[in-house]
Image: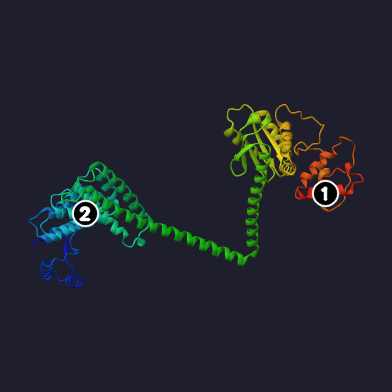
């Protein structure tokens, strides 16, 4: 009988206790140990017991010893089985050891074959190429052991198996697809216990396998028959269905987890929000005001953009949307026809420098080839002096002409038939090349061109807001009409009526009718 010098294999806790008790009795201990080992090995038990008296061998020497014992068929099957177990437990990754374990899959003793199979599973990744090669073994039993090992290795083996799919022979092809199917069964078994990092690679490799199967159907033909008589198309289609079902189950698991995470985060946010409201109610009020203001701003923007569309449509222009706050003038009559297509940008706030850059980028996109580029900027709040300088700067430096139009002028133009074309022509003539910037024959309607009377304008606006009557007197051409026009723009949030009283001397009823008409519009 063969006896390990450094290890004895016993599988019983009571026997180990007995061994410790008799360890001091060295004179007769060896005979008792030999007797116990003989009994245990005869019934197939094999659990290691470290004999302290023996000095440990180096790992390389130990593996070499196990390798010799595994390959020596003159040894008892218990010894070969124990050697295979130890090679797997120590995860010996050398190709010599792996090949010896592969050869042991064909051992006449079933326990040796089983121990060798599990040893290859323990070794894992390095054994995969050898196991795939074993799928071509002439023995179906050896093939089955290799399939089982690859199945238990699992996801790490799928990539190598996918690489073999395209070039595999038909019989080997079925073995590989069987392994995919078995790995899928393992993955589908309680997928909730698996991490995302474990599930995602399986889905990816299964998707690759389905593509490879479809390629195989095209290259090998659907009507080719396997050894057992079934058409290959039927078999491959059935395998594809199984893989797709597995992908669906695993993907549903991932989606369910994602929905669960989202629900938990929303619950936490809602709980934090409710706690905040309970702790500081004023924060909820501020948040509500922010949300209401955002919604109102969106509504105001949509309404204002609709009015701008009506303004240009009334000016016989062809338009289309351009971004969230803009339009594109494709065609229009008059002087602007030379510069189309051109962008229109609507601003609900006071314009700033970046708005000029935004408009310039839109112009470059629409009219790259034009030497002089034009853009229209429609604003609600009057720009400051720096913005005026920026308009002049890009005009001189870049040849980019900005036509600023106050939104109040558009609102007023829509109240009068033909007013849109007149207002657009007025601002176009003022800013396009060739305009006479010193023409003082008409009142100034352009907010950007009105300066020098800002303080008076603010005082008038404040007095009118307090319902205070005001009389405005001045010499001819001193700017009274221009001031009244700008006052209407500045107080656009109030209904403003412009009435020239001179034609209504002694005609009170006609004057009252004029009030009604303007209030109605």
- Say which of 253 and 98 sits in front: 253
The quadrant of the image that shows the N terminus is: bottom left
| Mark 1 vs mark 2: in front | 1
User: Is residue 62 visible from the viewing direction of this image?
Assistant: no
Indicate the quadrant where residue 336 lies: top right
Q: Position of residue 314 (x, y in %)?
A: 68, 39
Residue in view at x 65 percent, y 42 percent:
309
Q: Position of residue 288 (x, y in %)?
A: 63, 59
Which of the numbered marks, if any, corresponds to residue 88?
none
Residue in view at x 65 percent, y 58 percent:
289
Which of the numbered marks, if any, corresponds to residue 515?
1
Q: Is residue 85 left or right of residue 318?
A: left
Mark toward the start of the polypeptide (1 vs 2): 2
Number of residues whose C-alpha sits closer than 10 Å to that of mark 2, classed few (under 14), some (14–19) or many (20 or more):
many
CA–CA distance between discs 1 and 2?
A: 95 Å
**Relative to 1, residue 222 above or below:** above
- Say which of 143 and 12 sits in front: 143
User: Is residue 240 visible from the viewing direction of this image?
Assistant: yes
- Say which of 378 and 291 sits in front: 378
Q: Is residue 376 left or right of residue 121?
A: right
Q: Is residue 113 left or right of residue 513?
A: left
Q: Which residue is mark 2?
A: 147
Local SS, label 2? helix
Q: Position of residue 466 (x, y in %)?
A: 83, 53
Number of residues whose C-alpha sits closer than 10 Å to that of mark 1, classed few (under 14), some (14–19) or many (20 or more):
some
């Amino acid at each position: 009988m063969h006896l390990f010098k450094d290890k004895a294999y016993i599988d019983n806790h009571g026997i180990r206790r007995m061994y410790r008790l008799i360890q001091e009795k060295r004179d007769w201990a060896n005979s008792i140990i030999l007797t116990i080992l003989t009994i245990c090995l005869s019934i197939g038990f094999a659990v290691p017991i470290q004999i302290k008296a023996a000095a440990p061998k180096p790992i390389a020497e130990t593996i070499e010893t196990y390798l010799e014992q595994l390959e020596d068929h003159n040894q008892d099957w218990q010894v070969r089985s124990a050697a295979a177990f130890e090679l797997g437990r120590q995860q010996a990754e050398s190709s010599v050891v792996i090949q010896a374990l592969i050869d042991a899959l064909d051992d006449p003793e079933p326990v040796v074959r089983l121990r060798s199979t599990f040893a290859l599973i323990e070794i894992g990744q390095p054994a995969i190429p050898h196991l795939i090669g074993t799928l071509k073994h002439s023995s179906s039993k050896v093939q089955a052991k290799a399939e089982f090992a690859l199945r238990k290795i699992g996801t790490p083996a799928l990539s190598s198996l996918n690489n073999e799919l395209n070039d595999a022979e038909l019989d080997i092809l079925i073995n590989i697809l069987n392994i995919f199917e078995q790995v899928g069964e393992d993955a589908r078994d309680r997928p909730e216990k698996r991490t995302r990092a474990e599930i995602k690679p399986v889905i990816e490799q299964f998707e690759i396998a389905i593509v490879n199967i479809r390629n195989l159907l095209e290259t090998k033909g659907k009507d080719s028959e396997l050894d057992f008589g079934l058409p290959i198309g039927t078999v491959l289609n059935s395998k594809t269905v199984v893989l797709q079902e597995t992908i669906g189950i695993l993907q549903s698991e991932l989606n369910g987890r994602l929905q669960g995470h989202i629900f938990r985060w929303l619950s936490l946010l809602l709980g934090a929000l409710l706690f905040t409201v309970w702790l500081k109610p004023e924060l909820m009020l501020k948040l509500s005001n922010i949300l209401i203001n955002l919604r109102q701003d969106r509504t105001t923007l949509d309404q204002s953009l609709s009015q701008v569309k009506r303004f240009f449509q009334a000016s016989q222009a062809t338009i289309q949307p351009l971004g969230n706050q803009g339009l594109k003038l494709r065609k229009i009559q008059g002087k602007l026809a030379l510069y189309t297509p051109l962008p229109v940008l609507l601003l609900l706030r006071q314009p700033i420098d970046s708005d000029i850059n935004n408009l310039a980028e839109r112009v470059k996109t629409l009219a790259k080839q034009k030497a002089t580029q034009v853009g229209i900027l429609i604003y609600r709040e009057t720009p400051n002096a720096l913005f005026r300088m920026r308009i002049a700067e890009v005009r001189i430096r870049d040849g980019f002409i900005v036509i600023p139009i106050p939104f109040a002028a558009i609102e007023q133009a829509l109240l009068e038939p033909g007013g849109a074309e007149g207002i657009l022509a007025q601002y176009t003539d003022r800013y396009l090349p060739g305009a006479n910037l010193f023409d003082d024959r008409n009142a100034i309607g352009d907010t950007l061109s009105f300066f020098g009377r800002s303080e008076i304008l603010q005082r008038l606006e404040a007095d009118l807001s307090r319902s205070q009557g005001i009389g405005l007197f001045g010499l001819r051409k001193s700017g009274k009409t221009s001031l009244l026009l700008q006052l209407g723009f500045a107080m656009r949030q109030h209904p403003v009526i412009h009435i020239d009283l001179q034609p209504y001397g002694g005609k009170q009823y006609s004057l009252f009718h004029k009030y009604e008409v303007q209030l109605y519009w």
